[in-house]
Amino acid sequence: MTRPATYDRTELGGTFTFPGTSKTVHRMGYGAMQLAGPGVFGPPRDPDAAVAVLREAVAAGVNHIDTSDFYGPHVTNQIIKKALHPYPTGLVIVTKVGARRGNDKSWIHDASPKNLFDSVHDNLRNLALDALDVVNFRAWGDEGHGPGEGSVAEPVAVLAKLKKQGLIRHIGLSNVTPTQLAEAQSLIDVVCIQNFYNVAHRDDDAFIDDLARQDIAYVPFFPLGGFNPLQCGALESVAASLRATPMQVALAWLLQRSPNILLIPGTSSVQHLRENLAAAELSLPAEMLDRLDALAAESEGTQKG
C-alpha cells in the first residue's frame, strides 16, 4: 500500500478534479441516501430537517453530493431539488443507476436498457437538470457489498449512448472489479469508482493505488460497515486518544489513505454532518496510522486462529 508523503489539510480535505473534466470538488462530500425514510424508502420523518442538512452542507463548502433516484424512490432527489435548486455554481451531483425498488422496499438489480434509460430520465426530472454531471453504473455482487463477476459492457454501452445524446456528462462505476473497469474503459472514459472499503475492509488496496496512478477518483461506501468487536475496540481507543469520534477517525484515515479518495458520509442530522465535516481537520499521527493500518490483518489472523 502506498501513502502520500504529505497530507493537504486545506478546506474539507483538499480538492480533486475528476479526470478529463473541469469538475473540481472538495474531497469531503455528502451522501444523500439517509434523507429518505426508514429503509431508504418513502419520505423522511422530518422533511424540513432533510432540507436543513443539505443547505448546511453546501453552506459549509460541500460541492459533491452523491444520490440516486432509487433512494425513496424519487424522494431524495426531490428533497435535493427543493433544498438547493437553482444549484450553486460548482456543485457536482453524482447519481447512480442499475437498480429499482420493489413495493416491499426490496432492492432489485435491473441493468436492462429500459431501466437504465428510465432511471436517467427520472434523475433528470426529479433533480430538475438538463444533464447529469456523473452517472455511476451500479453493478450487482453475488452477496454482501462485494462485486461479482460478469460483463458490464452492455449497461456501459447504454450509458455511453445517453452521454452521446447529451443527457450524461461523465460516467463512473460502482461495485466493480479491476477487470470490469478495464472492460468499461475499452468503451468509455471512467471518472470514478464507488466500492465497499474502509480501514477494516481492505480488499481494494491495490485497486486504489492503481486508480490513483490513473487519477481516477475512488469513493468508498460504508466507511464503518462490517466492523467486528476487535476492530471497533481499536478504533474507539484511537478516537479517545484524539478526543474524536470513531467515525471521524475512520473518515480521517480514508482521507490520508490516498489523494484520489473522495468521501460521501451520509446523515440526516445537522449535528452529525458537522462532526463528519470536522474529520477533514483531523490529522492522524504516523503511529496511529500504523495501528489502524494493521487492523485488517490482525482481525483476519484472529478469525483464522
Image (cartoon, helix red, strand yellow):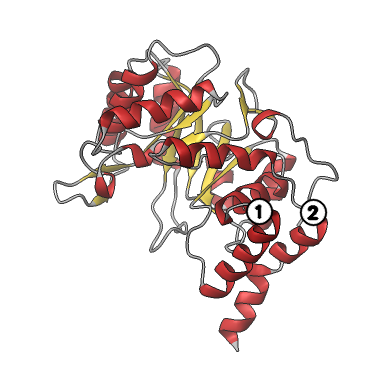
Rendered location of residue 140, percent (x, y): 38, 52
The residue beneath circle 1 is 243
Apparent side of residue 152 relative to residue 19 in the rendered image (left or right)? left
Q: Nearer the viewer, residue 152 or 220?
A: 220
In the rendered image, is residue 252 in sight? yes
Residue 246: name its quadrant: bottom right
Q: Nearer the viewer, residue 300 or 11?
A: 11
* Dot 2: element: loop
Rendered location of residue 30, percent (x, y): 49, 35
Rendered location of residue 146, percent (x, y): 47, 59
Residue that protrudes farthest toward the right in the picture: 5
Identify whether 232 is placed above or below 216.
below
Question: What residue is at 27 percent from the left and 50 percent from the top?
Answer: 39
* Dot 1: element: loop
Q: Nearer the viewer, mark 2 or mark 1?
A: 1
Identify whether 197 is placed above or below 291.
above
Question: What residue is at 53 percent from the left and 52 percent from the top?
Answer: 223
Question: What residue is at 64 percent from the left and 32 percent from the top?
Answer: 12
The residue beneath circle 2 is 285
In the rendered image, is residue 170 in sight? no
